Amino acid sequence: MIKPIVHDDQLLGLLVSHRFREEGLHFLTPEHLSQQLAFMRYPSGKTINPHIHLPAARSLQDTQEVLVVKRGKVRVDFYDKEQNYLESHLLEAGDIILLAGGGHGFEILEEAEMIEVKQGPYMGEGEKIRFHGIAADKIRLSE
C-alpha cells in the first residue's frame, strides 16, 4: 500500500495506494526530504487545533514533486541520474506518488486528471533535462 522506489540507496519515489487507510497521522517520508508527505485519517468530531507555521529558512537543492491521480490510469517510468531506465508502475485514481530523485516519465493509459504539488517558483524548462524514454517493448511493470 506504501511502496518506496529505491535505487542505489536513493529514494526515487514513494507510491501511496488509494487503498491505504490506516487510522491516525502517518508521516510517510524521511525527515531529510524537502517535500514531506503525510497521510491522515480521523473519525468525525476530531479537531486539529488552529496553528500558524513559523518562518524557517530552508535551502533546496532538488525539486521534488507530488502527483495526485484524480481520475484515469497513468504509467510512471523511473530512471537513475544517468538516465538509465529502472522500472515502471501503474497509478490509478486516488493514488499519490512522491517523486524524490532520479528521473521520471509518464504515459497516460486512460484519460487522466492529476494534481501536481512541488516547490516553487517554477523556473521554466531551464530547470529540466529532457531525454528519450524507454521503448514500449522494454517496459518492466513492477507490482
Image (cartoon, grey):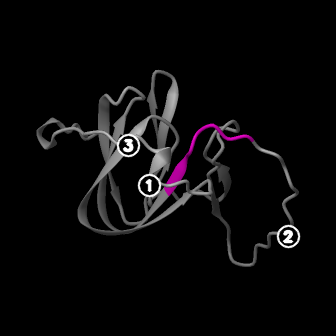
Amino acid on which disc 3 is placed: His
Q: Quick check: marks 3 and 2 in contact, CB under 8 Å?
A: no
| Residue under the point 70% across and 39% down | 31
Image quadrant where residue 23 sits: bottom right
Q: Is the magenta stretch mostly helix, strand or loop?
A: loop
Query: Where is 141 relative to 39, above or below?
Result: above
Query: Where is 58 relative to 39, above or below?
Result: above
x, y percentage for residue 127? 50, 45
Q: Is mark 1 on a helix, strand or loop?
A: loop
Q: How far apart are marks 1 and 3 (CA)?
A: 18 Å
Q: How far apart are marks 2 and 1 (CA)?
A: 28 Å
The answer to whether residue 1 of the structure is visible from this angle is no
Q: Quadrant of the C terminus?
A: top left
x, y percentage for residue 30? 65, 38
Q: Determine which residue is flagged by label 3.
A: 104
User: Is 27 included in the stretch rendered in magenta?
Assistant: no
Amino acid on which disc 2 is placed: Asn
Sequence order check: which comes first, mark 3 or mark 2?
2
x, y percentage for residue 80? 39, 29
What stretch of residues is rendered in magenta? Answer: 59-66
Q: Distance between the residues labelled 3 and 2?
A: 38 Å
Q: Determine which residue is flagged by label 1.
A: 17
| Residue under the point 68% across and 72% down | 43
| Residue under the point 55% across and 46% down | 64
Q: What element carries label 3?
A: strand
x, y percentage for residue 128? 45, 44
User: Is 64 included in the stretch rendered in magenta?
Assistant: yes
Foreground mark, 1 or 3, reads 3
Query: Where is 42 relative to 10, above or below?
Result: below
Q: Is mark 2 on a helix, strand or loop?
A: loop
